Amino acid sequence: MSAARFPRLLAAELRLILRERLTWAILAALVAALGLAAWTGAERIAVARTALAAAAADGERAVREAKAAHLRYSQPAAIKVNYWQDPTDAFGYRTYFMAAYAVKPPTPLSVLAAGPSDVQPAVTKIDFGFSTVFDDTATEIGSAAALRLGPFDLAFVLVVLVPLATIALAGTRLSSEHDSGILRMIAAQPVNPRRVAGAKFGAAALVALAATLGGTALALLLSGGLGNLAGWSGTAALLAAALAAYVVFWVAACALAASLWRGAVAALAGLVLAWACLTVALPTALGLAVDALAPVPSRIAAIDASRQAQARFYAGDEARRVTAAWLATKLPDDALRPGLADAPELKRLARDAHYDEALADHHRAARAQARAASAWSRKLALLSPATALALALETASGADAGRHAAFLAESATYRRSLRAFFEPRILTQALDPAPVCAGCPARLDFDAYDAVPAFAPADARGAAERQALLTLACLAAAALLLAALAVWRLGQWPA
Amino acid sequence: MRRIGAELSLCLHDARLRWIGAVLALLLAVAGLGAWRDAVRTGHDVDAVTAAERARWLGQDAKNPHSADHFGLWVFKPASPLAVLDPGSEPYTGRMVRVEAHVFNDAVYRAVQEAGPLARAGLGSVADIVGLVVPLAAILLGFSAFAADRERGTLRLALGNGIAPGRLFAGRLAALLLALVLVVGLPLLGIGALAALGRDAAGWQAWPRLLAWIAAQLAYAALFLLVAMLASLRARTACHALAAALAIWVGLCIAAPRLATAAVEAVVPAVSYREVRARLDAELRPHRTAEANDGRTREILARYGVSEADELPVDLRGLMMVENDDHHFALYDREFGAFFDGIAARERAFAWAGLLSPRVALQALSQTLAGTDFAQHAHFVWTAEAYRRSISERMNAEIRDRPERGGTTLVAGPELWREIPPFAHAPLPLARARADAAVPALVLALWLAGVGGLCVPLVRRLKP
């Protein structure tokens, strides 16, 4: 058979495959799964956006209430106002009024994957003091059963179910003809086995690609979970290409399984086992490797260190000594002013600095571990097509470990910037306590509520594009390698 | 019995069983021994820090009782010994709580937070392996039970010799079940025994839990063996039987569990923790204002019929702290009570969602029997909160009952600190686990009965 007749053979195979009821059942199930996954993704994004909006509203509410209290307590009245009730006290405002949040907003492609976002809150209320033993203190309790089973998201459907659908479509092509004896009839014709296999697996690939890419696009459009793609269309295109390469990889795996000529049972069993290895067993092994390469420092040891620091601070005259030493660095000229080292708010600031110093090594170790785990995961994920695609989808969704580690570090930096904003103001008020007015309950004169720095989330676009490109390259190489192997093995009909 | 023996002998000589057994033993040993090593290490760390925390509490300087209440301490959740087999909800819930004045703190630092991004791939624990790989092993053992004989023509021979189809089926099922007990039950018993003999097993009723847990896993494995045999009874060829059984495995063990998640989330809506915290904050804020404080002060003075705090028989600040805490406790009980009830309702819904997938039913049953379910976590959280309240109540009472007069400040010492007992947490008893396990056990039994029931007519009409 000449190469010119190959398209006719391909068209004939395409007609055959589309005539099978099993094909339509698989495609219907796949499209339904994609639709459901996109819908759950859209719901998830809606919840994330609600949380972000609630955080923003809470921040505005805090400023509004502080301004109202400022106004109320700036009128002469008999009422006694303590520092924790007084927004004119910079320390009181920072500690008991202010609602500052570090947030990790969803990306326009967040609908694609939940990733670890279900155990890593994207909104962190900035707090000072004891609760800052680690950067990731924020927690969001939910149903553990749901977390264990995992969400039905698009990443699950694309990474786990699409290969199964592809295997169901293409897994027994050629090998079932081999089992039934039809292959002998085909082999008796003047046709190259590569052309027959190419037509059969090419038709399966076309159907699988059309269903996967078309179904995903349709599901995304109908769910409404897709954000504004301005600036993200390149990443989306790369992901679509990576997804296509992933489908081709599995079709090539089917062709390779058929080329072993061991029959449909062996082909199907081998493919499902290969799928189980690549999507379940290998990622587990890679996870264990990441744990070994980036061992987790002991949280319990860090908590113990924080408690040792706390116990030290409150033992004997240590609090006064630490506060005086801290004041000497902050106010060299006024540190020895009588009573200053006993001011509760200054003692608290000195205590927080003392804790930070005591826990610095633990903080550094935790951050280094998070960075190392993320870096190793990015490298090792490329060893399995499933983890490579999952990582690309998670990174595009902004739910990857790298972005979360960066977010936690940015939250810690933001906490420090807030401290840097308030500390001079608190010190100034301690040195020169000036009430808003005489006879007013307001004790001091802080009113810079609108000047408090806001958190600026980092852009996740660059990382998403890089990861998508890397994944596309790896998946395309893997698909080509498998296809080349299959083509090589399909050079001859079985004996 | 002779038939079973013959079938078992055939089965034991099958290379498939050796391969499956070796792979399973390796996977279970790696996961189980790794978890056991981590559990022992964490147990030592927790014991050391718990002792250090107690020493710090008792050794703190003389100070105002309220300062001691703020000094607080950390308490740790004791892990169930069977967490080595099934960590259940433990990696997804916090392991330690900071106990301090005023605040119902979260149980923080979930193991899943510090796990690598690839760690949730699916085979992280012994229970995950049983949930996912053991069904595959059962299918690979059972798919050829009748279909391969039918394909070869030997089934016609066997039936022609007068063997009743029911006896043939029962013999093969029993032999394969025994093979499964060998390759699944024994490794689980070995790892479980190692965990149950550990030093932290006291109070957990570990042995009855372990035996019930293994029985549940074997029932689950038997279910998939029945699925494979059902496919084998029905299919014309071994290929079709394997394809059908694998399709069922993918459906029941891979796709359906996540569908169950989506279904439960849609059917049983739960309030988010963030919303609960926001609502609590919104209720506590007006309570903290100077005006509210002033109103409460005046109300107390009026209650005692005095005009100055110094005329009160109790300390005003102490009394206000007692009443403030009572107000907070009621709020926490209401909001967190409803929140935890909501999560418990979701967990119960997952037991019923086991009707969609036996893996979901097994997960609910397994973690309940292992003592690692959410009910155990909630029990720990409330025990820690009760302990926190007992400390606050004692410290507040000390302040209330020793009024500070003329600018003096109350200072307490070790006698008062010693009045606070060490934190003690007893897990929920096995009887509670049995009650909670009833629904998932029933669902798993329904699956077994359903698949077994489907086999009966096929066995009766068994055709060569």
Image (cartoon, grey):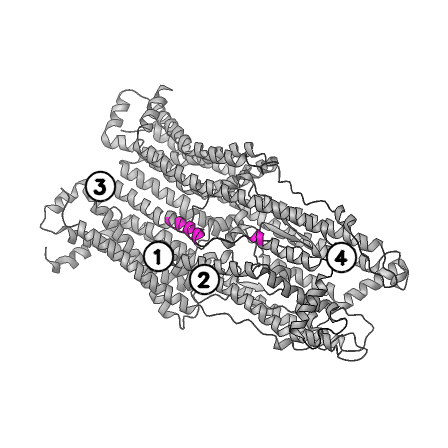
The picture quadrant where one finds residue A437 is bottom right
Q: Are marks 3 and 2 on the same chain?
A: yes
**Mark 2 chain:** A
Residue type at mark 2 is Gly
Inter-mark Cα distance, 3 to 2: 44 Å
Separation of marks 3 and 1 at Cα, in angstroms? 30 Å
Q: Which residue is mark 1?
A: A382
Name the amino acid type tagged 1.
Answer: Leu
Of helix, strand and loop, which one carries label 1? helix
Residue A42 percent across, percent down from the top left: 46, 61
| Residue located beneath label 3 in the image | A262
Specify the subunit that label 4 lies on.
B
User: What subunit carries mark 3?
Assistant: A
Please state if A313 lies on the left or on the right of A145 as rendered: right
Q: Are marks 4 and 2 in contact (CB under 8 Å)?
A: no
Please name which of the two marks, 4 or 3, marks the residue nearer to the observer: 4
Q: What residue did someone put label 2 on?
A: A402
* Range shown magenta: A282-301
Residue neighbourhood size for the residue with mark 4, other residues' Cα within 10 Å, grouped as few (<14), some (14–19), many (≥20): many
On the image, the x and y values in percent for residue B374 come to 57, 46
**Amino acid at pointer 3:** Arg
Residue designated by label 4: B66
The span from disc 4 to disc 3 (Cα, nearest Å) is: 77 Å
